[in-house]
Amino acid sequence: MQAYRRSYRRLCEPGGTYFFTLTLENRRLDILSRHIEALRHAIQREKQQHPFCMLAWVVLPDHLHMLWRLQPGDTDYSNRIRRIKAHFSRQLPPCEQTSSSRRNKQERGIWQRRFWEHLIRDEEDLRRHLDYVHYNPVKHGYVERAVDWPHSSFHHFVERGLYPRDWGGQVE
């Protein structure tokens, strides 16, 4: 447990740690999980061009949650998210209906325009958000155990000893 707490402390270093939720415009679609490689590519591309540390993430069919740490003095997460959304959208064939407003702004209509952002305040806030991210597939009924969801950083946290394998549902 002590190593668990020390590792959380390291995650909450200065530079701004943020929790984000990005959601598809049409919540009935499964574009994110179906095109997970395109999403990974969009995020990796943005990380290379405008560095940030991805602390945790989970990708569900219609939304995703991420925890990022930006470099000291950097608060430009909004443009990073805009570019990730745009790059991901450009990788997909047109499949969505778009309003005239979106067409005029040359938007695809895949994503909701806004996103949820929360500045992590302290170690306890970080822990709660990490738990929220990793438990989300169970919460939404996609799996019975966190370990069974493939599109999550939960597996890396288990490998690093930050979560037991049976956290978020019993493992037989």
Image: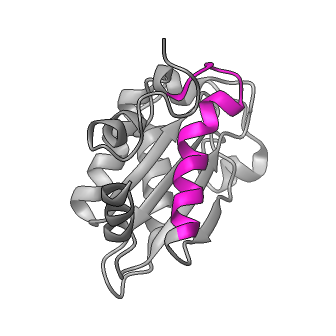
Nearer to me, 57 or 128: 128
- Residue at 41% of width from left, 46% of height from top? 87
- What residue lies at 65% left-to-right and 58% top-to-bottom? 115
Give whichever of 70, 36 is nearer the camera: 70
Considering only vertical position in the picture, is 157 above or below 19? above
Could you say which quadrant of the image residue 62 lies in? Answer: top right
Magenta-colored span? 124-146
Q: Quadrant of residue 42?
A: top left
Can residue 5 be seen in the rendering of this structure?
Answer: yes
In reply to whether residue 133 is colored magenta, the answer given is yes
Q: Nearer the viewer, residue 167 or 33?
A: 167
Q: Residue at point 31% right, 43% down?
A: 161
Q: To which quarter of the image does residue 46 belong?
A: bottom left
Q: Is residue 33 above or below residue 88?
A: above
Q: Is residue 78 visible?
A: no
The image shows residue 3, relative to residue 58, as above or below, that is below
